[in-house]
Image (tube, grey):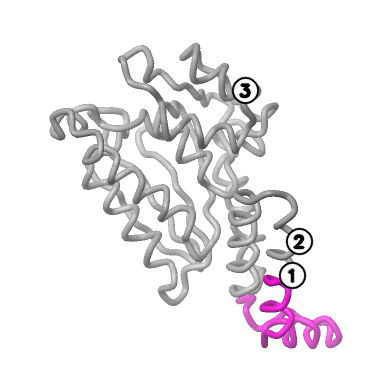
Amino acid sequence: MAVHVEHHGGVCTLTLDNPATRNALTGAMIASIVDQLEGAAAPGVRVFVLRGANGTFCSGRDLSDIARHDGDADAAMAPLLRLEEAFRRCAVPIVAQVQGKAAGLGVSLVCWADMAVAASDASFSIPEARAGIAPSLTTVSLIQAVGRRNAARLCLTGLPVDASAAQDIGLILQHVGAPELDALTNQLTDAVVRGAPQALCLARRLLNDAADVAASERIELAARTARQSFGSAELTEGIRAFKEKRAPSWVGG
Protein backbone atom coordinates (compact mmCIF):
# COMPACT_ATOMS: atom_id res chain seq x y z
CA MET A 1 0.00 0.00 0.00
CA ALA A 2 1.50 3.31 -1.08
CA VAL A 3 1.14 6.66 -2.74
CA HIS A 4 3.38 6.78 -5.79
CA VAL A 5 4.77 10.18 -6.76
CA GLU A 6 5.77 11.11 -10.30
CA HIS A 7 6.99 14.47 -11.60
CA HIS A 8 6.79 15.52 -15.23
CA GLY A 9 6.85 19.02 -16.70
CA GLY A 10 5.50 20.80 -13.63
CA VAL A 11 2.82 18.14 -13.02
CA CYS A 12 3.10 16.07 -9.86
CA THR A 13 0.96 12.92 -10.08
CA LEU A 14 -0.03 11.13 -6.89
CA THR A 15 -1.24 7.58 -7.51
CA LEU A 16 -3.08 5.71 -4.77
CA ASP A 17 -2.04 2.06 -4.74
CA ASN A 18 -3.63 -0.20 -2.11
CA PRO A 19 -4.97 -3.04 -4.27
CA ALA A 20 -6.16 -5.24 -1.41
CA THR A 21 -8.76 -2.64 -0.40
CA ARG A 22 -9.40 -0.91 -3.74
CA ASN A 23 -7.17 2.01 -2.77
CA ALA A 24 -8.75 2.69 0.61
CA LEU A 25 -6.60 5.20 2.45
CA THR A 26 -4.51 4.11 5.41
CA GLY A 27 -2.99 6.54 7.88
CA ALA A 28 0.36 6.19 6.13
CA MET A 29 -1.18 6.98 2.75
CA ILE A 30 -2.95 10.03 4.17
CA ALA A 31 0.33 11.25 5.64
CA SER A 32 2.06 10.80 2.27
CA ILE A 33 -0.56 12.88 0.46
CA VAL A 34 -0.39 15.60 3.11
CA ASP A 35 3.40 15.74 2.86
CA GLN A 36 3.20 16.21 -0.91
CA LEU A 37 0.48 18.88 -0.82
CA GLU A 38 2.15 20.80 1.99
CA GLY A 39 5.40 20.74 0.03
CA ALA A 40 3.77 22.19 -3.09
CA ALA A 41 6.00 25.25 -2.90
CA ALA A 42 8.90 23.02 -3.96
CA PRO A 43 10.49 24.27 -7.20
CA GLY A 44 8.80 23.07 -10.34
CA VAL A 45 5.46 21.83 -8.92
CA ARG A 46 2.70 23.69 -10.75
CA VAL A 47 -0.26 21.33 -10.46
CA PHE A 48 -1.16 18.05 -8.74
CA VAL A 49 -3.04 15.15 -10.30
CA LEU A 50 -4.59 12.65 -7.89
CA ARG A 51 -5.50 9.27 -9.36
CA GLY A 52 -5.84 5.62 -8.40
CA ALA A 53 -4.07 2.50 -9.60
CA ASN A 54 -5.68 -0.84 -10.41
CA GLY A 55 -8.67 0.64 -12.24
CA THR A 56 -10.09 2.21 -9.07
CA PHE A 57 -9.90 5.73 -7.66
CA CYS A 58 -10.46 5.33 -3.91
CA SER A 59 -12.95 3.20 -1.99
CA GLY A 60 -12.77 5.36 1.12
CA ARG A 61 -10.82 5.02 4.33
CA ASP A 62 -9.26 1.72 5.34
CA LEU A 63 -11.61 0.43 8.05
CA SER A 64 -8.79 -1.40 9.82
CA ASP A 65 -7.13 1.98 10.23
CA ILE A 66 -10.27 3.35 11.90
CA ALA A 67 -10.46 0.30 14.17
CA ARG A 68 -6.99 0.98 15.51
CA HIS A 69 -8.29 4.14 17.18
CA ASP A 70 -10.60 2.01 19.37
CA GLY A 71 -13.56 4.39 19.39
CA ASP A 72 -11.56 7.58 19.94
CA ALA A 73 -13.38 9.87 17.49
CA ASP A 74 -10.93 12.74 17.83
CA ALA A 75 -7.97 10.51 17.09
CA ALA A 76 -9.80 8.93 14.15
CA MET A 77 -10.75 12.30 12.66
CA ALA A 78 -7.40 14.04 13.16
CA PRO A 79 -5.73 12.62 10.00
CA LEU A 80 -8.79 13.48 7.90
CA LEU A 81 -8.91 17.05 9.15
CA ARG A 82 -5.24 17.45 8.38
CA LEU A 83 -5.84 16.01 4.91
CA GLU A 84 -8.73 18.41 4.21
CA GLU A 85 -6.62 21.32 5.40
CA ALA A 86 -3.73 20.26 3.17
CA PHE A 87 -6.07 20.28 0.16
CA ARG A 88 -7.52 23.66 1.13
CA ARG A 89 -4.16 25.33 1.78
CA CYS A 90 -2.22 23.75 -1.08
CA ALA A 91 -0.34 26.42 -3.04
CA VAL A 92 -1.11 24.95 -6.48
CA PRO A 93 -4.24 23.62 -8.24
CA ILE A 94 -5.30 19.99 -7.80
CA VAL A 95 -7.01 17.83 -10.43
CA ALA A 96 -8.72 14.56 -9.51
CA GLN A 97 -8.73 11.86 -12.20
CA VAL A 98 -11.38 9.26 -11.38
CA GLN A 99 -11.62 5.80 -12.87
CA GLY A 100 -13.72 3.04 -11.38
CA LYS A 101 -15.05 3.47 -7.86
CA ALA A 102 -14.94 6.60 -5.68
CA ALA A 103 -16.63 5.98 -2.35
CA GLY A 104 -16.78 7.73 1.01
CA LEU A 105 -13.51 9.54 1.59
CA GLY A 106 -12.78 9.01 -2.11
CA VAL A 107 -15.71 11.32 -2.89
CA SER A 108 -14.31 13.85 -0.42
CA LEU A 109 -11.05 13.87 -2.38
CA VAL A 110 -13.05 14.68 -5.52
CA CYS A 111 -14.86 17.51 -3.70
CA TRP A 112 -11.63 18.99 -2.35
CA ALA A 113 -9.88 18.99 -5.72
CA ASP A 114 -10.23 22.14 -7.81
CA MET A 115 -11.30 20.17 -10.85
CA ALA A 116 -12.29 16.55 -11.39
CA VAL A 117 -12.69 14.45 -14.51
CA ALA A 118 -13.71 10.83 -14.78
CA ALA A 119 -13.88 7.82 -17.02
CA SER A 120 -17.38 6.95 -18.12
CA ASP A 121 -17.22 3.77 -16.03
CA ALA A 122 -16.70 5.71 -12.80
CA SER A 123 -19.19 5.62 -9.94
CA PHE A 124 -19.56 7.75 -6.82
CA SER A 125 -21.16 6.65 -3.55
CA ILE A 126 -21.33 7.44 0.17
CA PRO A 127 -22.02 4.08 1.85
CA GLU A 128 -20.85 4.93 5.39
CA ALA A 129 -24.34 4.99 6.95
CA ARG A 130 -24.76 1.38 5.91
CA ALA A 131 -21.78 0.56 8.10
CA GLY A 132 -23.11 2.63 10.99
CA ILE A 133 -20.87 5.61 10.33
CA ALA A 134 -22.26 9.10 9.79
CA PRO A 135 -20.48 10.52 6.71
CA SER A 136 -19.57 13.74 8.48
CA LEU A 137 -16.67 15.28 6.59
CA THR A 138 -17.88 13.94 3.27
CA THR A 139 -21.36 15.39 3.87
CA VAL A 140 -20.18 18.95 4.46
CA SER A 141 -17.74 18.67 1.55
CA LEU A 142 -20.53 17.53 -0.76
CA ILE A 143 -22.89 20.30 0.34
CA GLN A 144 -20.35 22.88 -0.74
CA ALA A 145 -19.55 21.05 -3.98
CA VAL A 146 -23.00 20.04 -5.23
CA GLY A 147 -25.61 21.55 -2.89
CA ARG A 148 -27.73 20.10 -0.11
CA ARG A 149 -30.25 18.17 -2.20
CA ASN A 150 -27.66 16.32 -4.23
CA ALA A 151 -25.57 15.72 -1.11
CA ALA A 152 -28.63 14.29 0.63
CA ARG A 153 -29.26 11.84 -2.18
CA LEU A 154 -25.74 10.46 -1.91
CA CYS A 155 -25.33 10.56 1.87
CA LEU A 156 -28.75 9.32 2.93
CA THR A 157 -29.34 6.57 0.37
CA GLY A 158 -25.82 5.22 -0.12
CA LEU A 159 -26.78 4.60 -3.74
CA PRO A 160 -24.08 5.19 -6.33
CA VAL A 161 -24.34 7.73 -9.12
CA ASP A 162 -22.62 7.18 -12.43
CA ALA A 163 -20.26 9.55 -14.20
CA SER A 164 -23.02 11.12 -16.25
CA ALA A 165 -25.06 11.98 -13.15
CA ALA A 166 -21.92 13.20 -11.38
CA GLN A 167 -21.31 15.59 -14.26
CA ASP A 168 -24.92 16.77 -14.19
CA ILE A 169 -24.68 17.79 -10.52
CA GLY A 170 -21.26 19.40 -10.91
CA LEU A 171 -19.21 16.86 -8.97
CA ILE A 172 -17.00 16.36 -12.02
CA LEU A 173 -16.36 18.56 -15.03
CA GLN A 174 -16.52 15.91 -17.73
CA HIS A 175 -16.41 12.17 -18.33
CA VAL A 176 -14.88 10.34 -21.27
CA GLY A 177 -14.06 6.79 -22.24
CA ALA A 178 -11.24 5.31 -20.17
CA PRO A 179 -8.71 5.40 -23.06
CA GLU A 180 -9.25 9.18 -23.40
CA LEU A 181 -9.03 10.01 -19.69
CA ASP A 182 -5.30 10.71 -19.62
CA ALA A 183 -5.60 13.03 -22.61
CA LEU A 184 -8.42 14.97 -20.95
CA THR A 185 -6.41 15.30 -17.73
CA ASN A 186 -3.36 16.44 -19.68
CA GLN A 187 -5.47 19.07 -21.42
CA LEU A 188 -6.40 20.56 -18.05
CA THR A 189 -2.91 20.40 -16.56
CA ASP A 190 -1.35 21.88 -19.71
CA ALA A 191 -3.76 24.79 -19.42
CA VAL A 192 -2.98 25.27 -15.72
CA VAL A 193 0.79 25.43 -16.17
CA ARG A 194 0.38 28.26 -18.69
CA GLY A 195 -0.86 30.43 -15.84
CA ALA A 196 1.50 32.53 -13.73
CA PRO A 197 2.34 30.72 -10.46
CA GLN A 198 1.53 33.57 -8.08
CA ALA A 199 -1.66 34.50 -9.93
CA LEU A 200 -2.87 30.90 -9.74
CA CYS A 201 -1.98 30.63 -6.07
CA LEU A 202 -3.89 33.84 -5.31
CA ALA A 203 -6.86 32.76 -7.42
CA ARG A 204 -7.01 29.38 -5.70
CA ARG A 205 -6.85 31.03 -2.28
CA LEU A 206 -9.65 33.39 -3.26
CA LEU A 207 -11.82 30.52 -4.53
CA ASN A 208 -11.49 28.80 -1.16
CA ASP A 209 -11.81 31.91 1.01
CA ALA A 210 -14.78 33.34 -0.89
CA ALA A 211 -16.67 30.07 -0.63
CA ASP A 212 -16.36 30.19 3.15
CA VAL A 213 -17.67 33.68 3.84
CA ALA A 214 -20.91 35.61 3.45
CA ALA A 215 -21.48 37.27 0.09
CA SER A 216 -21.02 40.71 1.65
CA GLU A 217 -17.41 39.85 2.48
CA ARG A 218 -16.44 38.45 -0.90
CA ILE A 219 -15.84 41.82 -2.57
CA GLU A 220 -13.23 42.75 0.03
CA LEU A 221 -11.56 39.39 -0.42
CA ALA A 222 -11.53 39.99 -4.17
CA ALA A 223 -10.12 43.49 -3.70
CA ARG A 224 -7.40 42.22 -1.37
CA THR A 225 -6.44 39.54 -3.89
CA ALA A 226 -6.44 42.06 -6.74
CA ARG A 227 -4.10 44.37 -4.82
CA GLN A 228 -1.64 41.53 -4.37
CA SER A 229 -1.87 40.46 -7.99
CA PHE A 230 -1.85 43.90 -9.59
CA GLY A 231 1.35 44.86 -7.82
CA SER A 232 3.24 41.77 -8.92
CA ALA A 233 6.13 41.26 -11.30
CA GLU A 234 4.05 38.56 -12.98
CA LEU A 235 1.50 41.10 -14.16
CA THR A 236 4.25 43.27 -15.60
CA GLU A 237 5.70 40.30 -17.44
CA GLY A 238 2.28 39.16 -18.63
CA ILE A 239 1.48 42.56 -20.15
CA ARG A 240 4.93 42.81 -21.74
CA ALA A 241 4.60 39.33 -23.26
CA PHE A 242 1.16 40.20 -24.65
CA LYS A 243 2.49 43.37 -26.27
CA GLU A 244 5.51 41.52 -27.67
CA LYS A 245 3.32 38.67 -28.95
CA ARG A 246 5.31 36.00 -27.13
CA ALA A 247 4.75 33.47 -24.37
CA PRO A 248 5.37 34.79 -20.83
CA SER A 249 8.46 33.66 -18.98
CA TRP A 250 6.65 31.06 -16.87
CA VAL A 251 5.53 29.07 -19.92
CA GLY A 252 8.13 26.47 -20.78
CA GLY A 253 8.97 25.19 -24.21
Q: Is tag 3's residue or tag 2's residue first in the polypeptide sequence?
A: 3
Q: Residue at 23% of width from left, 27% of height from top?
A: 63
In the rendered image, the vertical position of residue 198 relative to residue 31, given as above or below:
below
Task: Please tell me how many numbered marks the rendered image carries.
Answer: 3
Q: In this view, does 75 lie to the left or right of 229?
A: left
* Amino acid at dot 2: Ile
Residue 231 on the magenta span: yes
* Amino acid at dot 3: Asn
Residue 87 on the magenta span: no
Q: In this view, does 131 lie to the left or right of 173?
A: left
> What separation in Å lies between label 3 and label 2 (alpha carbons)?
28 Å
Q: In which quarter of the image is residue 69?
A: top left
Residue hosting label 2: 219
* Category of crowding for the residue at label 2, using alpha-carbon neighbours closer than 10 angstroms: few (below 14), some (14–19), many (at least 20): few
Residue hosting label 3: 150
> What separation in Å lies between label 2 and label 1 (alpha carbons)?
6 Å
- State which mark lies toward you, 3 or 1: 1
* Category of crowding for the residue at label 1, using alpha-carbon neighbours closer than 10 angstroms: few (below 14), some (14–19), many (at least 20): few
Q: Position of residue 242 (x, y in %)?
A: 82, 81
* Amino acid at dot 1: Ala
Bounds of the magenta segment = 224-253
Using the image as rendered, state which of residue 10 and residue 113 is in the foreground. Answer: 113
> For the N terminus, which image quadrant?
top left
Q: Which element carries disc 1, helix, strand or loop? A: helix
Would you say the magenta stretch is mainly helix, strand or loop? helix
> What separation in Å lies between label 3 and label 1 (alpha carbons)?
32 Å
Q: Position of residue 25 (x, y in %)?
A: 29, 38
Q: Which element carries disc 2, helix, strand or loop? A: helix
The answer to whether mark 2 and mark 1 are in CB contact below 8 A is: yes
Q: Position of residue 175 (x, y in %)?
A: 63, 33
Q: Residue at 42% of width from left, 35% of height from top?
A: 137
In the rendered image, the vertical position of residue 71 relative to residue 198, given as above or below:
above
